[in-house]
Amino acid sequence: MFICVFLASSQRIDKKYQELAEEVGAELARRGHDLVSGGARVSCMGAIARAARAGGARTVGVIPQSLVDIELADEHADELVITGDMRERKGVMDARSDAFLVLPGGIGTLEELFEIWTSRTLGLHDKPLVVLDPWGIYRPLRDLVEGMQEAGFTRPNVFDAISWTATVDEAFRLLEKSTRHLEPSAEELGEATAG
């Protein structure tokens, strides 16, 4: 499974966030998955890609030309996709991914989270979306959306489209559990070959 991870590229954050990214990258590889990420070599983006590759995972970095021009690209990615702009970048990341995992990040991470969350709420895709938030960075966001839901501004199913967790292990269990329904069962495979 290709898991797209949205996370920070800021170099001004506490090292614990980069350590979380490394742990996620290592666990992703250990579980036999591959990584789609923002294609930068700095901060948490670089940390998750290096850890995933070290564990044997394939890494696909997707980065706009403007960021390549300022020498931020992860040139060691197994595949580096260079896009014309940020909008194209998100479209490629979405198309190349089977599931989405969100780690603590800034406004770019929030933009990516909201786009995937909104499109899933609207039924435009059924790819799992999990937020891994060990330190409660996104708690105010959850409170905000809960208030919006209570006031009728969001669809009643807004929280059916997303899962929240504080642990790496549970994040992967949620992603894997949610993607099982997308794969044909043994019975379905047997019927297909028998027919």
Image (tube, rainbow, N blue to C red):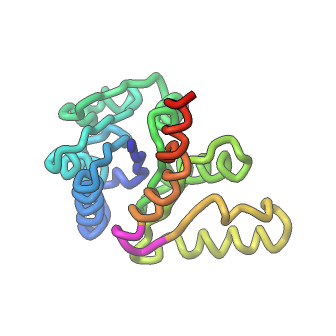
Whether residue 43 is visible, yes or no, is no
**29 part of magenta stretch:** no
Residue 102, position as x, y percentages in the image = 45, 57
Looking at the image, the residue that sits furthest to the right is 152
The answer to whether residue 147 is left or right of residue 120 is right
Q: Please report the residue visible at 67 percent of the width from the left and 71 percent of the height from the top.
A: 144
Residue 25, position as x, y percentages in the image = 26, 54
The answer to whether residue 105 is left or right of residue 30 is right
Q: Please report the residue visible at 41 percent of the width from the left and 77 percent of the height from the top.
A: 135
Q: Please report the residue visible at 35 percent of the width from the left and 33 percent of the height from the top.
A: 67
Task: Return the residue nearer the eye: 181 or 69.
Answer: 181
Position above or below: 75 against 182: above
Task: Return the residue nearer the eye: 64 or 60.
Answer: 60
Quarter placement of the N terminus:
top left
Quarter placement of the C terminus:
top right
Whether residue 21 is visible, yes or no, is yes
Task: Return the residue nearer the eye: 180 or 115.
Answer: 180
Looking at the image, the residue that sits furthest to the front is 194
Q: Please report the residue visible at 28 percent of the width from the left and 38 percent of the height from the top.
A: 59
Which residue range is magenta in the image?
165-170
Q: In which quarter of the image is residue 69?
A: top left
Residue 191, position as x, y percentages in the image = 55, 36
